[in-house]
Amino acid sequence: MDSLAVIKSPLISLLLVLIVNGCSRNSNQFSDTVPQNANHIYKPWFVDVIKQSGIDFKNLNGDPDQIPIIDQNGQGAAFFDYNNDGWMDLYLISGSTIKLWKKRKNPGNRLYRNNGDGTFRDVTREAGVQGNRWSNGCAAADYDGDGFVDLFVTNWGPNTLYHNNGDGTFTDVTEQAGLGDSRWASSAAFGDVDNDGDLDLYVANYVKFDPDHFPTREKDGSDCLYKGIRTGCGPWLYEGEQDILYLNNGDGTFTEVTQKAGLQATRGYRSFGTVLIDFDLDNDLDLYVGCDVMPNLYFLNQGSGKFFSAGRSRGGTLNATGKHESGMGVAVGDINDDGFPDVFTTNFAGETNTLYLNSRGFFEDVTEKAGLDKHPEELGWGNYMADFDNDGFLDILVVNGHIYPQVNQLKTESYTQPWRMFKGLGNGKFIEAGDNEGWHFKPRYSSRGAAVADYDNDGDLDILVVNHNDRPTLLRNQRGGNFLTISLIGDGKNPQAIGARIAIKFSDRTIWRYLTPHQGYQSSHDPRVHFGLGAAQKVNQITIYWPGGEVEMIKGPIQGNQFITIKKGEGIL
């Protein structure tokens, strides 16, 4: 058995992070050196396999002209293992139209069980998770610690909490759990913000919307225009909502504590993507929220679930020019191997997507330095930071799509837009993957959310893209390469160990990944922690920073190219 050491001091755990960073050869600098294989030509990186997958879902969200804002924002998706068979299942979300919504004839959502052979089967009705709401996003987590992953769905109108019964069925427990808030909710994230051992819930809410009285003109009575073309009206004409934090009572119910937790400042914000993660490595979960046409929100946890607004003093909410952007998707990852999670946000056309580098809880906009200031004509939504080519360096996925079909009248923009993959070079910079990297996807859709998982369990990460008013795209990754995928088993009522972070040592590097499945745009991702290993086939050491601060070190060598499970206090099972 691999040697195991457990450290319970939070102070020592932070010192370990700093010592590891100081002793490693990882660099925080933005080097101009390009790896030797950067121009190597590969076979297609991903292949669209939706037609042979058995997934027959089609998204519905609004009428063709997309005039009301409710029609425009679209949906996310979730990968999660609802039946504990080791294969990631898929939950796909649909909105509706105002006409159908008024008749309560919404199309509902779909749950697809992974058959383990590259195909999926629709089990929605037998599972009882179709719903009849205008749904937007979802977050999957075992909120009651019974060993089965539950599902929270954000809606326009009351949200829905589905409790996993452990027999392939779910029960709607929204009302008894105290989660039936009726605001327009966009994203949600589970995490133990008060370090009491169970999962709390943060819900990001968007705007107040009345389907019978929504803006069709600007405040001065003029037409709503985008570059001279009449379109639906922008979000600045809508009043923002209030986000909500719920504490888990440990008995299947939740209590709303937004003001008590110091989050009353979220009132009036138009919130989109959200993430709970420990930005300053003090062993409690902090909060970041992307906001539409206003500054993003950044709150630091002072311990026990009490937050203070840190954006003005620590950055991360405005871009390098001091301007707010549109904050659709929020993705996190450590691009410079210092242990501190960085933030990447997707934004509106005319802006750039933005990369904020984290230096011990302080953020700097490094978008231009990193080579990510490309394609400002595109409108970004779903995003994710992961090692998609298993070379040991984080890459960045962005899926795009305009909200106004009328932009097709312009020569410079299009309603359907390409997806982008930015390949990490390991020097703080990224290059856009193109034909030389096997990334061949041209604009065919106006896309919204994206969910990432290794759905075929072959060691590389695949992508599900939600296409607005269309069928989804399932991209199977063909790159292969050396990897290590880690599942964690925590204690108490957080058996998935959501909020943990893991460092591995291999070759001459230490790299960090985070168990943060709720991120991007209104989506939930594979909770198994994936590491690309580059040329290495063995790992020298694994260090787990469990939720709450305990640290566990496992000495190697540990063979790569496998899926392993680590149980708190027991090591590799």
Image (tube, grey):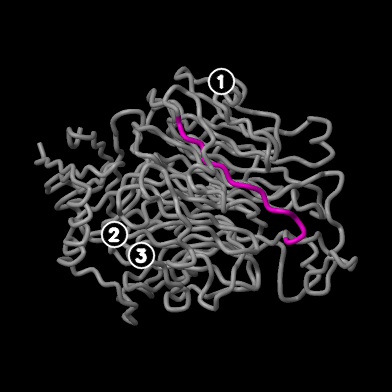
> In the figure, 136 relative to 180: above or below?
below
The single residue placed furthest to the bottom in the displayed view is 32
Name the image quarter holding the C terminus. Answer: top left
Magenta span covers which residues?
Answer: 236-248
Would you call the spot at circle 2 few (<14 residues within 10 Å), some (14-19), or many (20 or more)? many
Residue 263: image location, x then y, percent:
52, 49
Check disc 1 and give the amino acid type: Thr
Locate residue 194, reporting x and y percent: 38, 40
Q: CA distance from mark 3 to mark 2?
A: 9 Å
Q: Residue furthest right?
A: 221
What's the residue type where badge 3 is placed? Ile
Q: Secondary structure at mark 1?
A: strand
**Residue found 65% across the figure and 64% down from its top:** 293
Spatial CA span between label 1 and label 3? 40 Å
Query: Residue drawn 24% across and 46% down?
Result: 544
Q: Residues within 10 Å of mark 3 (few under 14, many from 20)?
A: many
Camera-side residue: 266 or 209? 266
Q: How much space separates mark 2 and mark 1, taking CA atoms?
A: 39 Å
Kindly tell me whether residue 320 is visible in this rendering.
yes
Q: Is residue 410 magenta?
A: no
| Label pair 1/3, CB-CB below 8 angstroms | no
Q: Can you tell which of label 3 and label 2 is closer to the viewer? A: 2
Residue 382 occupies quadrant: bottom right
On the image, numbered disc 3 is attached to which residue?
335
Q: Which residue is mark 1?
A: 171
Q: Identify the image quadrant of residue 162.
A: top right
